Image: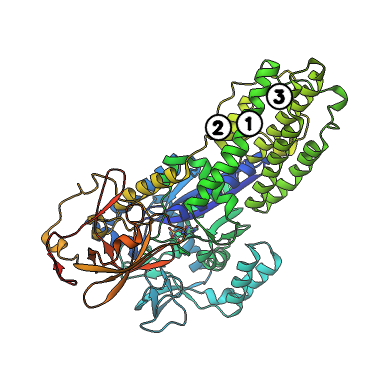
Amino acid sequence: MSTPRAKPKYYLTTPLYYTNGMPHIGHTYSTIVADTIRRYKRMRGFDVFMTTGADEHGVNVERSAQKAGKSPQQYSTEIAVQWKQLWDDLGIPGDEFIRTTDEKHHRTVQWLFKRCRENGFVEKGRYTGQYCVHDNAYVADAGPGDNCPDCGRPTETVTEENYFFKLSEFQKKLLDFYAANPDFIQPESRRNEVLSFVKGGLKNLSITRTTIRWGIPVPGEAPHVFYVWFDALIGYLSAVGGPNYDERGLWPADLHLVGKEIIRFHAVYWPAFLMAADLPLPEKIWAHGWLLFDSEKMSKSRGNVVRPRPIVNALGIEPLRYYLLREIVFGQDGSFSYDALVTRYNSDLANGLGNLASRTLTMIERYFGGEIPNPAAAQRKYTDAPSTAEFANEALTKVMHQYDRFSFSLALESIWEIVAAIDKYITVEKPWSLAEKPENRERLATVLYTAAEGLRVVTALAHPVLPQATQKIWSQLGQTEPLGGFQLDLLSWGQLKPGTKIGKPEGIFPRVDKSETIARIEAMEQEQNKAPEAPAAAAASTPVGPGAAPAPGAAAAAKIGIEDFAKVEMRVGQVKSAERVAGADRLLQLQVDIGDEVRQIVAGLALAYKPEQLLGRKVVVVTNLQPRKLRGVESNGMIVAASLPDGAPVLAGFLEDVPVGARLK
Ligand code: MSP
């Protein structure tokens, strides 16, 4: 048994991400949320443990490895290392990074299978069904030729001998469990979705494969390997002791945080596996919504992914954390936009919290020699500034309640109401005028004490979301205890000690120029998207992405054979019409005649060309690219252009006259 803990434990998990691709901002969102909850729970007195990791088996990874000319193990390891590195670099690492290729995970899966089998919940059978390779799931009620309802890709007909998990025997047990634990699935809309799915009847679930090799072997049953969900889900248990989970005392998990598309696996399969093995069930499954880009779920295949590193390189991780948690209502889908990101940064962080900290600390430095002033004794108990102090005290309770419900956007809104109230208080009280007359000294002390104390409260409350910036302000306020270990339950107004020496006021969030910052992020994004996963054709040319042009030097990639070049079909086109794309500074929507048809193409030309300049112009068009959407507008081809060092595009053209539709070779 585990040794008793001084504090209650809280074990939370992110999904274990697939290693057939690199992280984008959607994955980053999940991990940022988990890290925020971890920090919040620590400040509420919990001994917190967070797991993230990599889901490495399955057909997708096997195929990607094959394409890359590597073994699945080597390929998957290279990618898993990069995922882990990213979380480390962004300051959101798991306390454990579990890989489904870890030996301890293999042992746990095999052990769990044995328990389910011994308890009579596993049987052999044959199965034929429509399978979505991308989502690693059979598609219920689909026939041959049908597409997957989740991702829209074609399903494949699969027949094979499998081991089946007798999921059908768990319908009543699950429904009883959901009824006894009404908070098990969150939010309510997902709970309803799961309830109606389970009420509709459960089919037995195929949990092994004989057709693939890249998986955990079923002991003594070669060539069976475990298949995807009876592998990855078990990672949550492998991470905290597996068969010996009792020793660590962390299982059952208190929270599995997932995206809404995998709620069913977590809220139906996973509890059923655990029930079948007589193991304790997790406390809560919370399914958040999707980050959308160009109104669609971000995904590699749609070509609309946003990567985290360029944003972090340009602005830092904290503005990204703040933006995602403030702007997206947790549980719902939300659109990602660079514009909104930078706007939020400037208004809430640079002009809001950053400015409040710097003006308050600077005035204390200037008027009180860098010591927290002593408010007038009678006014110490905030009779002086009810609008700020009472308000802040009430807000404490409110904010903690909002964090408890994972209503991050509301919690931040409430915290920033305090920021605004203190700002207003300073503006009304005008400490700089009070400082001009010695008889106002006491009043000045009260005003600046109130501002500093308000700042301290805000700083503590915002810490789970902005860990580094708030720690800086906290130290500048002369607080020596690390903020991450501070207990929010002990926070109340008036704890700031007069006479405390403050640190040197330093800028926290410098204001940035919006267009320049977005251009920088987009340029880095384009560069990064070309790296390991980019399709060969996209690297060949041109600025049609969400605005930015490829950076210079990008063409110095590995050499390709003529057969690769021959895959790219280019033709002479003529622009028939051109207009700007609403809300996108760089994009033009063109109708281009390519000989036998007129194509709609969205191109990143607007910074260099006015729409009317392009009418009738002959251009080079890549005609055999997958269509994709840019800012919600379908683009069916790509216009070839050179890119100047500042990112401005220059259209490729001809000195001689060429007929429309002519091919380039
Ligand atoms: N490997 C499975 C999960 C197994 S868990 C035992 C998997 N992996 S994944 O790489 O596809 O990651 C999916 C998760 O990443 C989502 O559930 C969600 O947490 C996050 N997101 C991926 N795209 C996202 C958005 N566009 N928006 C928000 N979150 C997204 O599924």
Q: Position of residue 20 (x, y in %)?
A: 35, 58
Residue at 66%, 33% (x, y): give it: 486
Q: x, y percentage for residue 420?
A: 69, 41
Marks 1 and 2, how far apart at CA: 8 Å
Q: Which residue is mark 2?
A: 508
Q: Are marks 1 and 2 in contact (CB under 8 Å)?
A: yes
The total number of labels drawn is: 3
Q: Nearer the viewer, mark 3 or mark 2?
A: 3
Labels 3 and 1: the sequence-earlier one: 1
Relative depth, front residue between 228 and 519: 519
Q: Nearer the viewer, mark 3 or mark 1?
A: 3
Quadrant in the rendering for residue 5: top right
Q: Badge 3 is on which residue?
A: 432
Figure quadrant of residue 214: bottom left
Spatial separation of the CA atoms under disc 3 and disc 1: 16 Å
Q: Earlier in the sequence, mark 1 or mark 2?
A: 1
- In the picture, the disc for residue 357 is 1
Residue ID at (67%, 23%)? 363
| Cβ at disc 3 under 8 Å from ligand 1 | no
Give left or right: position of 14 versus 59: right
Q: Residue at x 54, y 47 (%)?
A: 343
x then y, percent, for residue 84: 41, 45
Mark 2 sits near ligand 1, with its Cβ under 8 Å away: no
Neighbor class of circle 1 (other Cα within 10 Å; few <14, some 14-19, many 20+) is many
- Mark 1 is on which residue type? Ala
Q: Quadrant of the C terminus?
A: bottom left
| Above or below 662: residue 433 | above
